[in-house]
Amino acid sequence: MNRFTRRISGAIFTIIVGLAVGWADAGADTTSHPSQPAKVSPRILGPNGYGGLQLGMTFADARAAGYVREDQPPDPPCRSYDLYRRGKRVGRVFISPDRGVEAIAPEERVRTAEGVKIGWPAERVKEVYPDLRLDLLPEFGALTVQVPGNPAARYRLGFSDHEHVSDIILHLADQPCAE
């Protein structure tokens, strides 16, 4: 192979590698999109639901999406069903025949859309939800607070030891189902 042939071969090789790298990167999105909303974590409860399960969703839609496995539709005022996500039982969902999903009660570790998690002390929760009535905690063991971003919903925060969050339920403010 003479010098001219080697140069041509080297140039062709460089072009082929360059094209291959360009094609491989062509589908990659390397730009930032700050105007696009971040994906919601499946472990976030609120302000409107839990993953794809939304307050107000009909029994038929919740069942079709796999959140409910039972065939029996809800009776008035509502019915409690096992809640499933990705084929695993993860809590309870309360559904009424006329208003759909009224309450979502995950039994797995979740956090609210504002960041409150299982295990948080009541005083820290009060920093996030200033209208939380800690004076009622010794009497009730659970408190409700308005869900920011959803005036029709409330969080029910359970405090099993009267000091730390033990469970979080998202429900319609006027629901009669999950008390």
Image: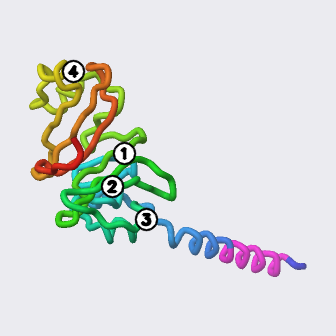
The label on residue 7 is none
Question: Residue beneath label 2, please?
Answer: 38
Q: CA distance from mark 2 to mark 4?
A: 29 Å
Q: Position of residue 161 (x, y in %)?
A: 31, 20
Q: Is 17 left, or right, of 150 in this rendering?
A: right
Q: Position of residue 50 (x, y in %)?
A: 32, 53
2 or 1: mark nearer the eye: 1
Q: Is label 4 in a helix, a strand or a loop? A: helix
Q: Is label 3 in a helix, a strand or a loop? A: loop
- Image quadrant holding the C terminus, namely top left
Q: CA distance from mark 3 to mark 4?
A: 37 Å
Question: Residue beneath label 1, please?
Answer: 106
2 or 3: mark nearer the eye: 3
Q: Amino acid at mark 4?
A: Glu
Residue 151, placed above or below residue 100: above
Q: Is residue 149 magenta?
A: no
Q: Main secondary structure of the magenta part?
A: helix
